[in-house]
Amino acid sequence: MKFKYAGFFILCAAALVLNGKIYAQENFEGKVTFNIFDNENAEAHSMDYFMKDGKIRFDAKEKEGMGAFIMDPASKQIMIIMPEQKMYLQMQIPETKLDSKAAHEMDKGEFSKTGDTKEILGYKAEKWVFKNDTDQGEAWMTRDLGAFVWFNNPMMREDSKPQWMKDLNEGGYFPLMVTENGKKVFEVTNIQKSSVDASLFEIPAGYKKMEMPSTMQK
């Protein structure tokens, strides 16, 4: 999938894991369902996002099969659950620093809050706009669900992050709808504030541990 700049905007909040900041997410327990749209063919990829006691779980629902990603910011651990293989992979979240070229590219982006608000799925959302050399768009975000954490992120160190990213992280924002160049790339479709079974964040019974490849180990 190709998400360009807006996609990275959605992913960047995962840097919160590195310093343990979860903000309002500590107070929200439940499930959020959202779609991510492939820019090339507008195909929707649906995911369920569970939150409980600071822990996060993603359930991907793809044609190729189900899969789950579990993140525990307190212990800085992630688990990948593979139901088809009855296996799981567990590892520490790495901390890396962007090289100067990548950091420069990120600094070229601009994010700003417009002051506009509206209600989406019963939650107050604030409008942000963003742009860089090639892309522009808008994001409607709420602070009622806590900061959004995404698995597939470079996991940057604090001194690698541009100011706009720090502002989003410290604000504890969760995107409800994001458009890029006039096309929808992200949309929350359902929010369920309810008790979540703690077993969803544990290794399923009978699953075998997969050893992490040596090239991924520190």
Image (tube, helix red, strand yellow):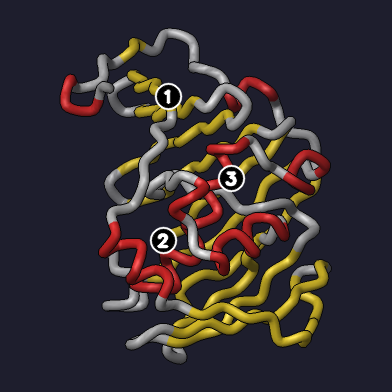
Q: Which mark is residue 152?
A: none
Distance from the alpha carbon under mark 3 to that under mark 2? 24 Å
Return the x and y of residue 81 as percentages of the image width and height: 40, 28
Q: Amino acid at mark 1?
A: Gln
Residue 28 occupies which quadrant of the picture? top right
Q: Amino acid at mark 2?
A: His
Q: Earlier in the sequence, mark 3 or mark 2?
A: 3
Q: To which residue does mark 2 refer?
A: 45
Q: Nearer the viewer, residue 18 or 22?
A: 18
Q: Which residue is drawn at the image coordinates 58% and 45% (left, top)?
A: 16
> Is residue 110 found left or right of 148 in the rendered image?
left
**Which circle, 2 or 1, is nearer the viewer?**
1
Distance from the alpha carbon under mark 3 to that under mark 1? 15 Å
Q: Is residue 43 visible?
A: no
Q: Earlier in the sequence, mark 2 or mark 1?
A: 2
Return the x and y of residue 185 as percentages of the image width and height: 45, 74
